[in-house]
């Protein structure tokens, strides 16, 4: 979540406006259209001079964004990209453990906190929802349903 910790101060420096974390996260609701994704674990995001600049460059190069991505787009893209990264980690842990649902509930809570809505079904991961396991769909189907692409 270090990316988010870099984005908020950059937003505040750019706009001269001090805002709370919930207000900053809620700005993502201003994004419209499909959600461009990026690899939050890519080397370019480990301490760049400008985190928002690195994200905007990646979205232009790989995410189908033309022009400069707005702050709502940068934030929503980060939130969903992070959620996808968590889901991939969860899938790997479940594969290594040899059984589904090992960490699903905990990851689902983190994902919900990160993006403000529950993502069920990325990469065939099982998440706990209302005490029951739900079989997940493939990553592409989940990403399409969320309006994401990459």
Image: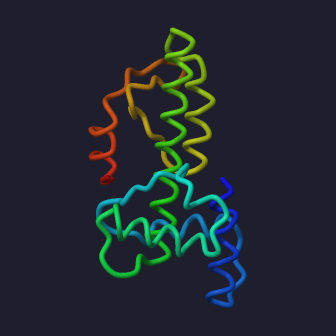
Residue 61 picture location, percent across and down: 35, 67
Taking the spot 70% from the left edge, 63% from the top edge, the residue there is 5
Residue that protrudes farthest toward the bottom in the picture: 16
Image location of residue 79, percent across then percent down = 52, 55
The quadrant holding residue 58 is bottom left
Residue 105 vs residue 139, the one in the foreground: 139
Q: Percent x, y for residue 75?
A: 52, 66
Instruction: Residue at 47% x, 62% y: name it.
Output: 76
From the viewer's perspective, tell me whether residue 125 is left or right of residue 6.
left
Quarter-wise, where is residue 121 in the image? top left
Q: Eyeballing the image, is 123 above or below 72?
A: above
| Front position in the image: 135 or 13 | 13
Question: How many dots with numbers?
Answer: 0
Q: Is residue 60 left or right of residue 86?
A: left
- Say how the picture is coloured: rainbow
Q: Residue at x 48, y 26 (%)?
A: 91
Front residue of 99 and 42: 42
Q: Is residue 135 above or below residue 107?
A: above
Residue closer to the observer: 52 or 138:
52
Relative height, residue 113 to residue 77 (above, below): above
Q: Is residue 21 left or right of residue 146?
A: right
Which image quadrant is residue 73 in?
bottom left
Residue at the image point whose x is 64% and y is 58% from the top = 46
Q: Where's residue 81, x and y in %?
A: 47, 51
């Amino acid at each position: 979540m270090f990316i988010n910790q870099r984005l908020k101060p950059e937003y505040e420096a750019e706009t001269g406006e001090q805002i709370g974390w919930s207000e900053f996260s809620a700005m993502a609701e201003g994004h419209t259209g499909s959600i461009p994704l990026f690899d939050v674990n890519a080397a370019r995001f480990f301490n760049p001079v400008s985190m928002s600049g690195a994200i905007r460059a990646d979205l232009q190069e790989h995410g189908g964004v033309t022009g400069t991505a707005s702050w709502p787009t940068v934030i929503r893209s980060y939130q969903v990209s992070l959620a996808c990264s968590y889901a991939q980690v969860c899938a790997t842990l479940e594969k290594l453990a040899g059984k589904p649902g090992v960490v699903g509930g905990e990851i689902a809570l983190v994902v919900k906190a990160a993006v403000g809505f529950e993502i069920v079904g990325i990469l065939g991961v099982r998440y706990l929802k209302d005490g029951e396991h739900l079989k997940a769909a493939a990553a592409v189907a989940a990403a399409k349903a969320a309006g994401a692409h990459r």
